[in-house]
Amino acid sequence: MIVAMSCTKNWYSYVAVELYALFKHNNIEKVYLFIEDDTIPFIKNDKVHFINCKNLPNYISKDSPNYNSIYTQMSFLRCYFSKILNEDKILYIDADAIVVDNIQELWDIDLKDNVIAGVHEGGTDWNAHLCTYGLNDTYINSGVLLMDLKKIREEKLDDSMLYLLNHNHFWYPDQDVINLVCRNRIQLLSNIYNSTVDTGIVENAKIIHYVRKDKGWIKTSPRSEIWYRYYNEYMNKKDILISIITPYYKTLNYIQELAKILEPQLTNEIEWIIIDDGCSEQELDKLKAKVIHLEKNSGGGSVPRNVGLDNAKGEYILFIDSDDLVTSNYISTIVDKINKEGDTFNYCYISWTSDWGDIIIKDEPPQNNTCIWNCIYKKSEIGNERFNPEIIIGEDYDFNLRVRKGVHGNITDILYIYNINSPHSLTKGGWK
């Protein structure tokens, strides 16, 4: 079975879960994964072939009436797989789907004289759109497609698709064009192979498709528990490299903004531990993190951080305050530093920025900065040391005196964004 998938940078950790589920249930020959980089470091599978979309020919002009912030070059890949993949047949699966069973029977389907197979895109919401093209009975959803690339290539159907995309506007460009060009050559599949959450997941579904805004990794989405079953298996299948510890106290809006940046970076090697310091904030349970609710407020950051350390499984420890932010390359840069130089340092400084300006640490941080969020700690170096709950202000300084020993490294890239205006910081106006 030869599979093709694609995703942008912010979906890398989600497609990793999809790949885990796919390989768990199926014997896969290879997967072509189209991404925005040369590789995804945390996806280590020899059968996954990474293709950097930036290196592909521009088959779709940026002047195309269909090219915009939503529909980019990556969105149109299905229309020209036949030009860039040296394969006779592929199975395409959207990155927001999850394979929950063996799909060998789907791969083995004989398309006969047809060139493509998919599940009918039905429902009253689509009727007006389908009537535009007269395709009511055969219009298929492009989230799961069995494609005969050899026929598409030989009959130059790919050229026809590209011509339409470059010269005509469509509401659903890639899907509309595939249906128009392949009309009368489309084989309908059972909806067990593309069961969408908006129309209800059918019994015995083999591929579940979390369409539109109802993504599987959003805990409020319909049937997200299915996606999270595979996510939890994936996260537990190997040792944790990094544990991120975040104490929480009445900063919901801030931590939700942090989650938007951090969650797409989380992988099976990274765990995020949030300690709710007596707030009983149930919204935290919707985040992609291990949330520990303390029954009563401890009055400072020491107790929740100690709880985080006691529960951390990672070889390395990071601290992020719930009212701060990180950059989109926070995890990848730190993992790269650990992989390349982890055996050369006992702890490592991280550069950061705030309204006061950029702090680039080339050797030692400013003397008045004794915080813990600008450092990568080795759990082995921390050992049994913990924060002193008796110290309300300056607990970071006391902790660092005891654990920052030996050789230190530096990351000069700015990775941390410090918020000086949090209403719940004990040291507002100074380093936390």
Image: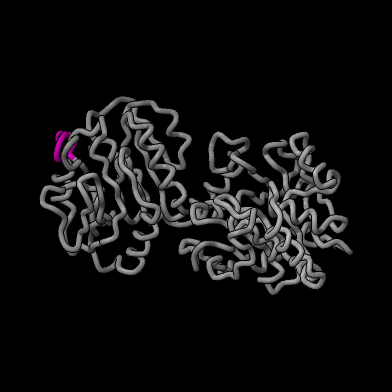
Residue 214 image point, x, y percent: 60, 39
Asked which quadrant contains residue 32, the reply is bottom right
Can residue 47 be seen by looking at this rendering?
Answer: no
Question: Who's the residue at 17% across and 42% down the image?
Answer: 431
Query: Could you tell me which quadrant the N terminus lies in?
Result: bottom right
Residue in front for this viewpoint, 66 or 251: 66
Asked which quadrant contains residue 341, the reply is bottom left
Q: Main secondary structure of the magenta part?
A: loop
Question: Who's the residue at 67% across and 49% down the image?
Answer: 100
Instruction: Tell me if residue 130 is in the magenta stretch.
Output: no
Residue 193 image point, x, y percent: 75, 50
Instruction: Answer above or below: position of 280 versus 21.
Output: above
Instruction: Answer above or below: position of 386 versus 103.
Output: above
Instruction: Answer above or below: position of 383 versus 195.
Output: below
Magenta range:
388-394
Question: Who's the residue at 82% across and 42% down the image?
Answer: 131
Residue in front for this viewpoint, 147 or 291: 147
Instruction: Answer above or below: position of 339 versus 258.
Output: below
Can residue 141 be seen by looking at this rendering?
Answer: yes
Q: Is residue 404 left or right of residue 40?
A: left
Residue 211 image point, x, y percent: 64, 43
Residue 142 image point, x, y percent: 72, 52
Residue in front for this viewpoint, 414 or 200: 414
Query: Could you tell me which quadrant the C terminus lies in?
Result: top left
Q: Is residue 217 left or right of residue 319?
A: right
- Considering every residue shown, the one lying at the far left of the view is 367
Q: Give the total of numbered labels.
A: 0
Q: Is residue 311 left or right of residue 156?
A: left
Q: Is residue 329 left or right of residue 76?
A: left
